[in-house]
Image (cartoon, grey):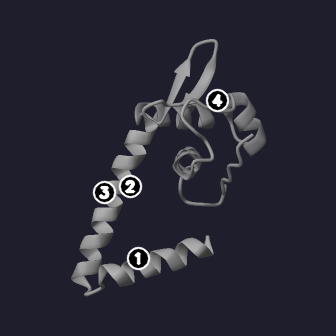
Amino acid sequence: MIKIYVNPYDSKPLYRQIVGEIKNIIASGELKEGEKLPTVRELALSLSVNPNTVARAYRELEREGFIETFTGKGTFVSRKVSAKVSGKLEQLIRAVIIESRRNGITIENLCKKIKERSEEL
């Protein structure tokens, strides 16, 4: 079972926390295209939240194209998700490069900072 953490004391709604956690897990490669997610009931039980909260998160993820639900089979990571993640990553890279140039940071220094941070994770 995937490890998802939610904080009931956070001002962010629980369903949005679940959406963010699942997106992060997909982006990290821990969940791959076509891989099955826990049922709504299983995830609700493991997180100690109402099943409606998980169902809402799953609907949001499906609407955004990250997951697909097949009646009688379950919920799976979308087969189109890598293109979606790649597109988002490209946007982030572009934004980082633009911001770096604005602040006079060379590409070499930017790469060095990224390498340093990646080693910390």
Q: Which residue is mark 2?
A: 89
Q: Earlier in the sequence, mark 2 or mark 1?
A: 2
Kindly report the distance in space between the C-alpha atoms of the residues bearing marks 2 and 1.
16 Å
Residue type at tag 3: Gln
Kindly report the distance in space between the C-alpha atoms of the residues bearing marks 3 and 2.
5 Å
Taking the spot 56% from the left edge, 52% from the top edge, the residue there is 28
Q: Position of residue 53 (x, y in %)?
A: 60, 37
Q: Which residue is mark 1?
A: 111
Q: Which residue is mark 4?
A: 36
Residue type at tag 1: Cys
| In the image: residue 50, left or right of residue 99 | right
Q: Which residue is mark 3?
A: 91
Kindly report the distance in space between the C-alpha atoms of the residues bearing marks 3 and 1.
17 Å
Q: Position of residue 74 (x, y in %)?
A: 63, 21
Q: Earlier in the sequence, mark 3 or mark 4?
A: 4
**Discs 3, 2 touching: Cβ within 8 Å:** yes
Q: Earlier in the sequence, mark 4 or mark 1?
A: 4
Neighbour class for label 4 at 10 Å: few (<14), some, many (≥20)? some
Residue type at tag 4: Lys
Q: Position of residue 97 (x, y in %)?
A: 28, 71
